Image (tube, grey):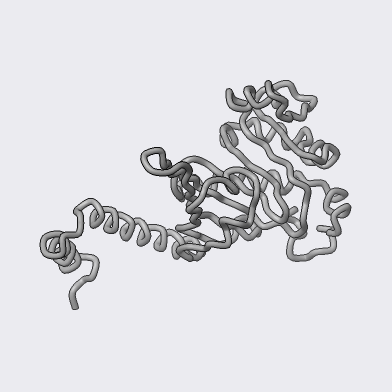
């Protein structure tokens, strides 16, 4: 039986280019995406995750950045599994802005962990030039007792008490380690979500999920209980949170 990924497929592609007149660039893009899908599927199989292709619901699940802007929003290359006992999702998120010659497509690799209860939004982003400009025009930046942390991270939340409870000294120390440098992350609803420029990169997935797990572990029991959940009575999460 001919190998569908081998010479027969290549011959069919060339026939499509020569006879049907499909542009070579489109054929090449299709071929590259096909091979990428094969690699992601193989990675999922090897790690016990699932490759699910696309999921339009993910484009509407969160409201904070990078979501809720532009149009033609797509969530593709969706991978689902568990990381250190917590349900996890990874996907490539695309959206566009502008029109005509000014139309621009943006791509982010989004990773998320499911939380067992709804929590107030707390966002942590690098305190770079963009953050400094935002603060000049009145953007929020909650201050903590660590000057090193304040210089490295910008923290925003409408619930200051929850933000201070979660961003405790242990979490601040953890987020100053090199593997957390440059991460953008947010607790929103029943998720902790992180986003980074570019498409899905499985080589960075464990590192980034490790940072999200550290944030989940930093959430004190009293914060969970204030929002209707007690991790000490839930055997499915006890020891994880």
- Residue 84, above or below 160: below
Q: Closest to the observer: 95 or 100?
A: 100
Q: Is residue 166 left or right of residue 8?
A: right
Q: Residue at x 50, y 65 (%)?
A: 50
In the image, residue 197 lies at what x, y percent? 48, 40
In the image, residue 114 lies at what x, y percent? 67, 57
In the image, residue 49 lies at what x, y percent? 51, 63
In the image, residue 139 lies at what x, y percent? 71, 29
Q: Is residue 96 left or right of residue 2?
A: right
Q: Residue at x 70, y 49 (%)?
A: 188
Q: Closest to the observer: 35 or 205?
A: 35
Which residue is situated farthest in the left direction here?
A: 18
Q: Residue at x 63, y 34 (%)?
A: 125
Residue 179 picture quarter? top right
Q: Residue at x 65, y 58 (%)?
A: 86
In which quadrant will I find the N terminus? bottom left
Residue 163 picture quarter? top right
Q: Is residue 165 left or right of residue 96?
A: right
Q: Is residue 115 left or right of residue 102?
A: right
Residue 41 picture quarter? bottom left
- Residue 166, above or below 117: above
């Amino acid at each position: 039986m001919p190998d569908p990924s081998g010479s027969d497929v290549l011959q069919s592609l060339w026939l499509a280019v020569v006879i049907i007149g499909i542009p070579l660039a489109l054929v090449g893009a299709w071929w590259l995406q096909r091979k990428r899908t094969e690699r992601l599927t193989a990675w999922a199989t090897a790690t016990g995750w699932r490759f699910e292709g696309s999921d339009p619901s993910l484009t509407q699940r969160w409201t904070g950045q990078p979501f809720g802007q532009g149009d033609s929003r797509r969530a593709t290359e969706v991978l689902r599994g568990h990381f250190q006992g917590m349900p996890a999702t990874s996907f490539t998120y695309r959206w566009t802005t502008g029109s005509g010659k000014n139309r621009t497509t943006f791509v982010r690799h989004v990773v998320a962990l499911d939380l067992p209860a709804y929590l107030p939004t707390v966002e942590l982003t690098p305190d770079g030039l963009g953050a400094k400009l935002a603060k000049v025009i009145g953007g929020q930046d909650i201050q903590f007792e660590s000057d090193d942390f304040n210089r490295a991270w910008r923290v925003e939340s409408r619930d200051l008490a929850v933000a201070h409870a979660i961003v405790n000294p242990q979490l601040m120390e953890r987020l100053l380690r090199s593997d957390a440098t440059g991460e953008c992350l947010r607790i929103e609803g029943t998720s902790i979500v992180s986003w980074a420029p570019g498409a899905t990169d499985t080589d960075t997935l464990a590192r980034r999920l490790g940072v999200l797990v550290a944030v989940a572990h930093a959430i004190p029991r009293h914060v969970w209980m204030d929002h209707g959940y007690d991790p000490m009575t839930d055997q499915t999460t006890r020891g994880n949170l």
